[in-house]
Image (cartoon, rainbow, N blue to C red):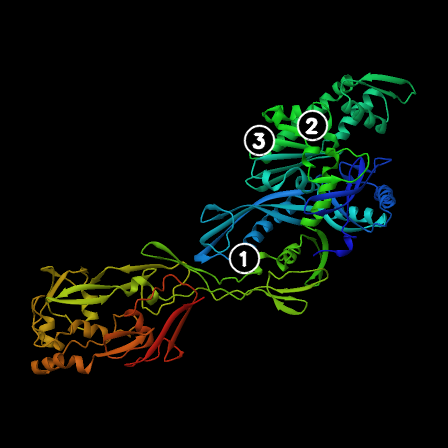
């Protein structure tokens, strides 16, 4: 969101508000690079800033005004808008990771990436809030370091199919009082903030161009109060850091050693650094003039320089995963003290040539159209603040979220997600929430059925319904109603794949297919039983003799039964393909015992399995084990034979229906209901893929609705 008022005839005003001095730069950018048309520098008269933090807002504001007035005289025009940067002293960064697993392979969209990043930032926010319960931090941006697709690194997730995606990112935070202090000081000087960035980012924009970021490089911006650190690798910024040691530490030891005030000590430090082979003359607080070799002054500072270099090197190694970077660029006035770069190289364990102060080398694309100016590392950060305006145009904006005023760091890419995250709206209440899942075991193996997905959050922007990715601007009004919870998971025994299987026995030479029994927590249950959370379901692979003949509707009282040619009782277990023989069937139903190869029936129609016919006529019974004994007859043999031969026409009715356009034949039962189709049509209910849709002849299907020949059924999953 570009502020046209901030660019006055293509000029940008950047201000580096440092601990010891304030540097102002005015310039413009074109295809050749950045052009500086005016510069001004003013040291603080007192220590109004310490370690990069404003302590006296109005004294800092007075110094800013002096820089502003100087620049206006050079330009012969007024300046009203300024770009600034916050010091690394107050910047907090958190590395966070997040992972999202899809229920099935899914093509990744921008919405998925937003959600993934949000999960990581939310983790970072929770972490920083735990560490600092008294300070309110604002997330001012996040930088993805690495994406992974199904466990493999990838540059861009969008458009790929994935089962699992993950991200590692750096989230950056600033305390509210720091931002307010900067804004107040700038406002006191008669200026308005056009954009806000971070000093490490501003310095990096100049010192480490995009083409260098493939390398593992460190940047140290050594100011007066802090040493800000930035690391790059594989084309990305991988870490930010800071140590609270910089140029002022050296100045203080010089002041104490040579008995001079702080400002005089600072001048001594600069003169010794610029002329290491010469001498420095000054007057101490007693008025005595002293001339000291620069080498002695540098030696006095060596202990502090050594400590500062070691702490900086240790921080770089920590941020870089326990190992040194390949090279280090040093910018800022504090890094020019003799011996500093050599010490950093020594503690990093790399060649001393690979740690160097960068000034003119990184300012080659910057033209200084200012008289009597020499390119210097001191000006890398203020120029970077200006160029950052063109690339990010960051600022803070205010929006209203559910009647709460929220301040956001504007990176020109703000969405509703960023705003609701800032107010602490729970992430799980933004996206559809599933109902309670169902956990149970089948034959000792864990089984999970997910609940139905609820409705997503209802989001409105300025009174109009929109989505979480909608862009936002200053003073937007956002309302968010939390997402809904879906129906809890539901499954019946008959929906289990294992329940659809049958088990076959050979009864009097005839194959008899029988449904498997389901025991739930030790109790026999029908296919209509609603599975409960924690149920232990066992699908038995055997029948007892009593269960087998009860299923076939034959009374075997008083008759011998042989299982695999051995005399059995009613509790004998009969497993798949076991042979069972008894005279009860032939005597009661006119059943002629035959071999398995020859059924003994005259026509194809008569070869319908009598046991299957009898058993399936009992399918509506809840347990498949109770009911009247239809197999025992007291009439004549002729009557029994007539029943056998007429069974197909009187008791069994075969129908053909269309399921999803495919003809499916239903056989073996007298009457059929809609739920019976799952026994004849392959449809995996064990792995839900959304909401099941079942229609009968174009209308919503009811499981108990009767089925007739020629009925049309639609059956599918709906996301």
Label 2: how many residues lie within 10 Å, few (<14), some (14-19) or many (20+)? Answer: many
Who's the residue at 60% across and 27% down the image?
348
Residue 55, given in percent of the width and then of the height, sits at 81, 40
Q: Is residue 580 above or below residue 262?
A: below
Q: Is residue 127 above or below residue 364?
A: below
Q: Which one is in front, 709 or 383?
A: 383
Residue 107, given in percent of the width and then of the height, sits at 46, 58
Q: Which mark is residue 211?
A: none
Who's the residue at 19% across and 61% down the image?
571
Mark 2, secondary structure of its residue: helix
In this rendering, position of residue 467 left or right of residue 710: right
Mark 3, secondary structure of its residue: loop
Gap in angstroms between the C-alphas marked 3 and 2: 20 Å
Give the labeled residue for mark 1: 110
- Nearer the viewer's eye, disc 1 or disc 3? 3
Residue that sits furthest to the right in the current view: 287
Give the labeled residue for mark 2: 308
Q: Quadrant of the C terminus?
A: bottom left
Q: How many marks?
A: 3
In this rendering, position of residue 300 left or right of residue 547: right
| Residue 607, quarter of the rendered image | bottom left
Residue 283, given in percent of the width and then of the height, sits at 89, 21
Q: Is residue 424 above or below residue 325?
A: below
Q: Could you tell which of marks 1 and 2 lies nearer the N-terminus? A: 1
Residue 446, given in percent of the width and then of the height, sits at 37, 54
Q: Which one is in front, 141 or 428?
A: 141
Mark 1, secondary structure of its residue: helix
Q: Could you tell which of marks 1 and 3 lies nearer the N-terminus? A: 1
Check whether the beta carbons of the residues at disc 1 and disc 2 lie within 8 A of each other. no
Label 1: how many residues lie within 10 Å, few (<14), some (14-19) or many (20+)? Answer: few
- Nearer the viewer's eye, disc 3 or disc 2? 3
Q: Which one is in front, 214 or 417?
A: 214
């Amino acid at each position: 969101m570009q502020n046209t008022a901030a660019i006055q005839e293509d000029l940008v005003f950047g201000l580096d508000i440092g601990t010891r001095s304030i540097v102002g730069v005015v310039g413009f950018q074109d295809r050749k690079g950045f052009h500086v048309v005016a510069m001004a520098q003013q040291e603080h008269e007192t220590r109004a800033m310490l370690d990069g933090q404003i302590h006296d807002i109005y004294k800092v504001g007075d110094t800013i005004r002096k820089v502003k007035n100087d620049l206006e005289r050079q330009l012969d025009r007024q300046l009203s808008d300024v770009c600034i940067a916050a010091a690394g002293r107050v910047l907090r960064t958190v590395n966070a990771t997040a992972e999202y697993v899809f229920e099935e392979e899914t093509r990744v969209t921008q919405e998925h990436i937003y959600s993934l990043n949000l999960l990581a930032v939310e983790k970072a926010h929770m972490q920083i809030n735990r560490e600092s319960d008294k300070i309110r931090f604002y997330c001012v941006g996040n930088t993805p370091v690495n994406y992974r697709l199904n466990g493999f690194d990838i540059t861009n997730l969008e458009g790929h199919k994935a089962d699992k995606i993950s991200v590692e990112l750096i989230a950056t935070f600033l305390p509210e009082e720091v931002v307010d202090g900067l804004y107040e000081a700038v406002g006191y000087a008669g200026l308005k903030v056009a954009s806000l960035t971070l000093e490490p980012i501003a310095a990096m924009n100049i010192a480490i161009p995009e083409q260098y970021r493939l390398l593992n490089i460190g940047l140290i911006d050594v100011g007066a109060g802090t040493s800000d650190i930035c690391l790059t690798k594989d084309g990305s910024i991988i870490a930010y850091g800071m140590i609270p040691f910089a140029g002022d530490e050296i100045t203080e030891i010089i002041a104490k050693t040579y008995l001079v005030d702080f400002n005089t000590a600072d001048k001594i430090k600069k003169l010794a650094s610029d002329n290491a082979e010469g001498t420095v003359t000054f007057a101490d607080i007693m008025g005595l003039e002293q001339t000291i070799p620069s080498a002695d002054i540098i030696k006095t500072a060596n202990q502090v320089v050594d400590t500062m270099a070691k702490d900086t090197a240790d921080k770089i190694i920590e941020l870089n995963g326990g190992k040194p970077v390949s090279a280090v660029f040093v910018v800022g006035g504090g890094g020019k003290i003799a011996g500093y770069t050599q010490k950093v190289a020594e503690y990093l364990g790399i060649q001393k040539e690979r740690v160097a102060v960068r000034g003119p080398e990184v300012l080659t694309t910057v033209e200084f159209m200012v008289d009597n100016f020499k390119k210097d590392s001191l000006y890398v950060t203020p120029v970077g603040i200006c160029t950052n305006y063109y690339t990010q145009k960051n600022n803070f904006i205010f929006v209203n979220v559910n009647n709460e005023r929220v301040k956001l760091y504007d990176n020109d890419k703000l969405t509703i997600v960023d705003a609701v995250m800032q107010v602490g709206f729970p992430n799980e209440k933004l996206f559809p929430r599933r109902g309670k899942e169902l956990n149970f075991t089948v034959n000792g193996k864990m089984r999970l059925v997910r609940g139905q997905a609820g409705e997503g959050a209802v989001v409105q922007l300025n009174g109009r319904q929109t989505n979480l990715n909608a862009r936002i601007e200053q003073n937007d009004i956002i309302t968010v109603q939390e997402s809904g919870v879906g129906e809890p998971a539901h499954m019946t025994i008959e929906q289990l794949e294992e329940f659809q299987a049958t088990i076959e026995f050979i009864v009097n030479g005839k194959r008899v297919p029988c449904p498997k029994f389901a025991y739930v927590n030790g109790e026999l249950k029908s296919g209509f039983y609603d599975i409960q959370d924690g149920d232990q379901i066992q699908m038995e692979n055997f029948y007892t003799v009593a269960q087998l003949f009860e299923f076939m509707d034959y009374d075997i009282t008083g008759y011998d039964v042989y299982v695999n040619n051995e005399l059995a009782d009613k509790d004998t277990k009969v497993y798949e393909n076991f042979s069972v023989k008894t005279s009860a069937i032939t005597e009661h139903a006119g059943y002629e015992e035959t071999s398995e190869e020859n059924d003994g029936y005259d026509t194809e129609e008569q070869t319908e399995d009598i046991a299957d016919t009898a058993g399936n006529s009992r399918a509506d019974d809840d347990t498949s084990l109770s009911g009247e004994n239809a197999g025992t007859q007291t009439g004549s043999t002729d009557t029994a034979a007539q029943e056998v031969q007429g069974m197909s026409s009187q008791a069994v009715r075969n129908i053909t229906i269309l399921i999803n356009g495919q003809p499916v034949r239903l056989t073996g039962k007298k009457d059929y209901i809609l739920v019976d189709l799952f026994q004849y049509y392959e449809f995996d209910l064990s792995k839900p893929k959304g909401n099941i849709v079942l229609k009968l002849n174009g209308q919503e299907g009811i499981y108990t609705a009767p089925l007739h020949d020629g009925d049309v059924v639609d059956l599918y999953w709906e996301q």
